[in-house]
Image (cartoon, rainbow, N blue to C red):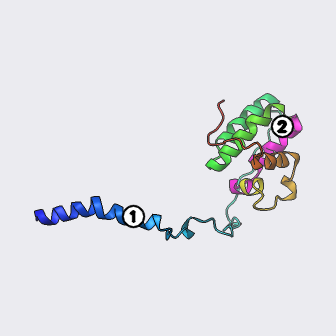
Amino acid sequence: MLAQFLISAVSRRVVRPIVATHRFASGTLDKTEFTTPSQIVDYDDPPHLPVPEYPVRPDEPLETRKQRLLYQSRKRGMLENDLLLSTFVAKHLRDFSADQTAQYDELINGVSNDWDIFYWATETKPTPPEYDTEIMRMLKQHVKNEERVQRIRQPDL
C-alpha cells in the first residue's frame, strides 16, 4: 500500500510535468482546436417566436434619452457588445444631435438579436439597408480601432 502511494506521488510530481513539458516544447501540440471557424453558424429566428415591438418614446427629452442609451449600451447581455457599445457611447454620445441619437436608439433597440449588431459592426455580415446609417458607419470605424486603444473594460461613468 505504501509503495503504491509513493509510486503514485512520484508519478504526479516528476513524470507528468516532464511529459507535459516535452509535449508542448516539441511543437506537436494540435492547435486546430483553438482556431476560429472559417464559417459562422448563424440561424434565422423561427417565425413562431414573436419579438415584441420596442416602444417609441416621442416625448422623451434628448438628455433623458441619452442617459437611457448610455445605460442600455453598457448592459447588452453579451460582453462583446457591452465593450464595443459602451466605449463607442463614451466617445460619441454627448456630441450626437437629436437625429443621430434617434438613429442610435433604433440601432440598439430595434434589432432583436445582439449578435446581428456585433456581426454588422465587425463587418462579418453585411448590414441591412435600414440599419446602414451614419451611426453604423461611425460604429464600424470605432470597431476598427485604428488608434489601438485597449478596450478590456467599460469606461467609467
Label 1 SS: helix
| Residue topped by disc 2 | 58
Residue 153, picture quadrant: top right
Give coordinates of residue 125: x percent, y percent.
77, 62
Q: Residue at x 63, y 65 (%)?
A: 36
**Does any portion of residue 61 appear in the rendered image?**
no
Q: Residue at x 41, y 62 (%)?
A: 21
Whether 104 is among the magenta residues is yes
Whether 82 is among the magenta residues is no
| Residue toward you, 148 or 91 | 148
Give the crowd class for mark 2: few <14, some 14-19, many >=20 residues within 10 Å: few
Which residues make up the magenta segment? 97-117
User: Mark 2: which amino acid?
Assistant: Pro
Q: Residue at x 81, y 61 (%)?
A: 126
Residue 29's place in the image compared with 69, above or below, is below
| Residue topped by disc 1 | 20
| Residue toward you, 90 or 31 | 31
